[in-house]
Image: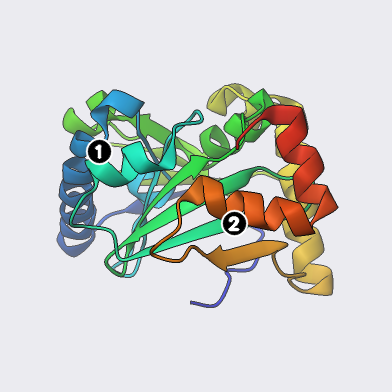
Amino acid sequence: MPREKVVRIWDEREVVYTPKRWRYLWEKREKALKIMGRLAQFDPQLYGSVARGDVRRESDIDIFIPYRVPGYLIELALEGLVSRRKIVMATPWHLIKGVIEIGEETTVTFPLIDPTDRELEFYRWGGALDLWGVKTNERVPGVNKKLILIIPTEKGHIEREVVGRESEVAKILGVSVDIVTERVHVLTRRDSIGRTGIYINEEVPDWMSFEEALKVIADRDPNVRKKVRERGGI
């Protein structure tokens, strides 16, 4: 799917959901609930559009584990569902993550090194919801890939532009102003110079654990090796 570009909206606007859009949301929530139920002991978080509510038919279901867990425990919990396993790192300065793909639209992501508070804030920025919140049909505010703040309402959601409202957005999301300004900078820069790619995006072979695959990468890459030494992970 092509990456969505940042858009500008000059006034707040309300979006009222159609019955079809509500159906897409609840269908994706039902799928998320089944996966999160299997992962309940790891405090799974649903994040992104399915947590906020502003879904489309092609929206992915993204689930995140907020602390380091041995990969095999997550795989055991998801036994019979795993279709693909990857190690991903956006840049040499970002979190190293294990990614488990389930079917075509669901991913479970978990840190392979100890995450920082700033790295966890990234998920609250996009909107994050715990298992209880999903069970009780809660929706949360968050910012989409177009840099629009989504605030859920009973009829749908309200949209507000983030640029120029960084402090207000930070307060609504419960994150630091720093993460807001950083994300604004990253996303607007990508639009001006194009996507710069991802530092690591490697499939983990069936016969290898996530931790073994990370060691192979760390042995050849000094940036990864330094990160692992600083924050554990192998």
Q: Residue at x 51, y 31 (%)?
A: 68
User: Is 56 on the left or on the right of 19, as rendered?
Assistant: right
Position of the C terminus, as image quadrant, is: top right
Q: Residue at x 82, y 70 (%)?
A: 192
Q: Which circle's residue, 1 or 2, is located before the other in the chain?
A: 1
- Closest to the camera, between mark 1 and mark 2, is 2
The CA span between labels 1 and 2 is 21 Å
Q: Nearer the viewer, residue 119 or 179?
A: 119
Q: Quadrant of residue 172?
A: top right
Which type of secondary structure does the marked residue at label 2 adopt? strand
Q: Nearer the viewer, residue 27 or 146?
A: 27
Q: Is residue 138 above or below residue 160?
A: above
Which residue matches tag 1? 36
Q: Nearer the viewer, residue 156 or 118?
A: 118
Amino acid type, label 1: Met
Q: Is residue 96 above or below residue 127?
A: below
Amino acid type, label 2: Val
Q: What is the number of callouts on the image?
A: 2
User: Is 48 on the left or on the right of 93, as rendered?
Assistant: left
Which residue matches tag 2? 88
| Residue 87 place in picture, x, y as percent | 55, 56
Q: Is residue 86 above or below residue 193?
A: above
Task: Give the label on residue 184, or none.
Answer: none
Q: Is residue 130 above or below residue 27?
A: above
